[in-house]
Amino acid sequence: MSHLLFHDGQFYRDDKLIVGAGSRGLRYGDGIFETMKVNRDQLQLGEWHMERMFAALRLLEFDCPGYFTPGYLLDKILQLAHRNGHAHLGRVRLMVFRGNGGLHDPENHYPHHVIQTWALPEANHHWNENGLVIGIHGKAQKAADILANCKTNNYLPYIMGALEAKHQKWNDAILLNTNGRICDTTIANIFAVTDGKIITPSLPEGPVAGIMRRYLLDKMAENNIPFIDGALTSDTLLSADEIFLTNSTYGIRWVGSLNEKRLGKEFTRSLYEQFIRPLFLAG
C-alpha cells in the first residue's frame, strides 16, 4: 500500500525519487535523522527529539532558514501521520541531509529534509513477555567522539552489528566503543542491573544520546532510584542479573539471554510499570 512522504515543503507519494547521484547525503552520509513515535495524535517526547536534532544541525554547520524550526517540523510530522492514517500509533523517521556537491564544495548548507511514517501494532505498547536474545558484536567499534551522541547517517558500525545479529539469530547486537567498553546496541541504549543497582554507558562513552534513555534517567532521579551513568565493561554486563534496552519506539525491552546466559526481569518490569506504561497511556 502506497503512502505519502514529506520532502522539502511538499507531500509526495513515497515511491518518488528525491535525491540524485550528486547528493552529499548519498555520497558521504552527510546528515542526521530522528526516529520518533506518534501516540494518540501526539508526538511522544517531541520537544526532546527536536532539541537533539537541532543541536546536531548546529554541530554539523547546517544553515537553517528562519521557517525551519522545531514547530515547523513537528507540525509537518503530525500532518503526514494523519494523511497516512498513522496518527493513532505510528513510527516516524525524519532525515535531514545536505544537498549536492563534493566533499569540499557543497552547493549550500540548506537542510533538505524527508519525513516518513509507518503504522505500529498495538503490541508495541505492551511488555515483551519473551525476553530478547542479544550478543556482543566485536568487529566494528564506535568512536567516542563529538559525533557519537548524534544520530548521524554514518551508520556503518551499527549496520555491521545488525548483520551479525541476523547471522546469529539475535534480536539485537551490542556495540563496543574503541576502548573496548559497552557503547549501545544497533537500535537502543543498554542498561545492566546487578543487586538492584543500574548502570548505563555515559554519553562520553559514545552511545547515541537516546531520548528514552534521558526520560528514564530523569524519572529514576526524581524517584531516588540509584543508577550509575558511567563506563560499562563486558565483564560487568556478563555478570548482570538483568539487562534491558530502551528506545523511543518500544520504550523498554527486557533481555532474556546474553551469550546463552539466562537473565531475570523483575526489576526491569517494575521500571516499565512505573515509568513507561504511564507514558504510553498519556499519549
Image (cartoon, helix red, strand yellow):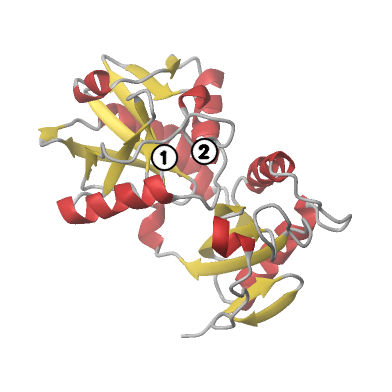
Q: Residue at x 63, y 45 (%)?
A: 49
Q: Is residue 22 above or below residue 245?
A: below
Specify which label sits upstream in the sequence, 2 or 1: 2
Q: Residues within 10 Å of mark 1 (few under 14, many from 20)?
A: many
* Residue 40 seen from this side: no
Q: CA distance from mark 2 to mark 1?
A: 8 Å
Quadrant in the picture for residue 11: bottom right
**Amino acid under label 2?**
Gly
Quadrant in the picture for residue 237: top left
Labelled pair 2, 1 in contact (Cβ < 8 Å)? yes
| Mark 2, residue position | 210
- Judged from this view, the residue extending furthest toward the left is 260
* Residue 254 seen from this side: yes
**Amino acid under label 1?**
Thr
- Report x, y in % for residue 37: 54, 55
Q: Nearer the viewer, mark 2 or mark 1?
A: 2
Residue 246 image label: 1
